[in-house]
Amino acid sequence: MFNKTLLTILSFLIFHGSVQAHQLKVFAYAEQDRITGEVYFAGGQKLKNARVSLANLKGDDEIAKTRTDTDGSFSFPVNVRQGYRISANSGEGHVAHWDVQMSELIMSESEPGSLQPSNPASPPPMCEPQSGKLKTLIESAVSRQVAPLRAELQEVRDERQIQDILGAIGYIAGLAGLGMLWFSRRRGSRL
Amino acid sequence: MAHIPEGILSEPVLIGGAVLGVAMLGYSLKRMPAESIPQTALLAAALFVSSLVSIPVGVSSVHLLLNGLMGIVLGIVAVPAILIALVLQAVFFGYGGLVVLGVNLVNLALPAVLCAVAIRPLIHNASPRKSFWLGLLAGGLGACMTGTLLTGSIMLSDPSLIPAAKIILLTFVPLMAIEGVITGFTVGFIKRVAPELILPKEGCHV
């Protein structure tokens, strides 16, 4: 009877889907002039009301801070095209970081002067401003479409795999074997 | 949560934890008998798997620590067993981390060693029924001491985390009960079915 209970418990531990983790994760992506993301525990549980702060990648002071809403998501408006680091803190000792690289950010209004024609009165030669604007539009549309995919990819990557668990148990068995080998060698040399 | 992630503790706490951890590990490995390897590996695997299952308690969540059980069954050899489980968790799942390994090891292994010193000698001659109560005590004490050490190391590092640490300590209250019952049943069961699983006194006593 006991063996049966033990087996049930063990299989529950290993295969139950709701096995949750402790590790805090934050995922963020740039969406035009916003950085949007969510905070969750590895395994998928979203974390509401977590502190999230925004800083640049140079490690200066934080630029903005907010808290996640009920589904664990947050959003920051950004106005400078640079790399950003998002830090999430659950308030009880779990912290997580996520970096958004500068190349991900596509500003609707790019660097001042880069897209604006210097003389609006004269007709644009070769439609250059238009193509610049079109490029921004396409890039932002693509990034919007790709964002959920990236989020999903990240989720899959964070999922704990049964292979990992079995692999670690294999490591432990291997270490035990090595230990026994070592002990038996030592004992053998003494004889 | 028994794994302190990286980036929370201050350097003195990290270094202190690492030094104490290495000292405990060295002492324990020196006294580790060859016969203890299977049990050590088994309990390391049990700790590794049980830490993956966390039970939500309020804002935080807890998972089984099993350090009371390890102290009872393995004695001082609990230290390498806990170390291996912690290293694998850090490498495979990113729990804790290699920098905080020393502190996490001490937080889990010191209570195990104390259980080994205080309760283990009583278990060897105890009846299964009495072993249940001794196991209950060991499990509860193990969780209680780990909770204290954990919050202590957080408070020492960053006084601004004291309110958070208090909340964590509260989550250890239900854990103490769960841990105590599980350890009690396990020790009672081992005593009844396979008492030889509990390592003999000679060689493994502290």
Image (cartoon, coloured by chain):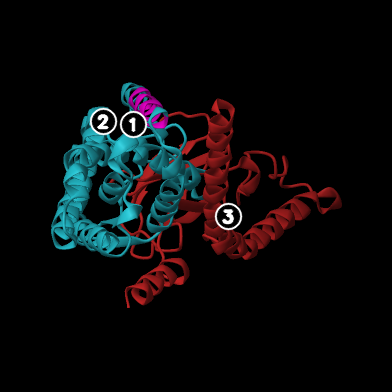
Look at the image and tell me in which quarter the C terminus of chain B lies: top left
Q: Amino acid at mark 3?
A: Gly
Q: Colour of chain A?
A: red
Q: Amino acid at mark 2?
A: Asp
For label 3, the crowd category at 10 Å Cα-Cα, with few meaning under 14, some 14 to 19 and many 20 or more, is some
Residue A105 point in image, percent of width and height: 61, 47
For label 2, the crowd category at 10 Å Cα-Cα, with few meaning under 14, some 14 to 19 and many 20 or more, is few
Check disc 3 and report the residue beneath it: A167
Residue B176 part of the magenta segment? no
Check disc 2 and report the residue beneath it: B158
In the image, which is nearer the foreground, mark 3 or mark 1?
3
Residue A71 visible in the shown view: yes
Q: Nearer the viewer, residue B184 or A96?
A: B184
- Where are the magenta residues, as a range? B18-29
Whole-number angstrom distance, CA of label 3 to CA of label 1: 30 Å
Q: Chain of mark 3?
A: A
Residue positioned 35% across, 46% down in the render: A94
Q: Which element type, helix, strand or loop, lies under badge 2?
A: loop
Residue B22 part of the magenta segment? yes
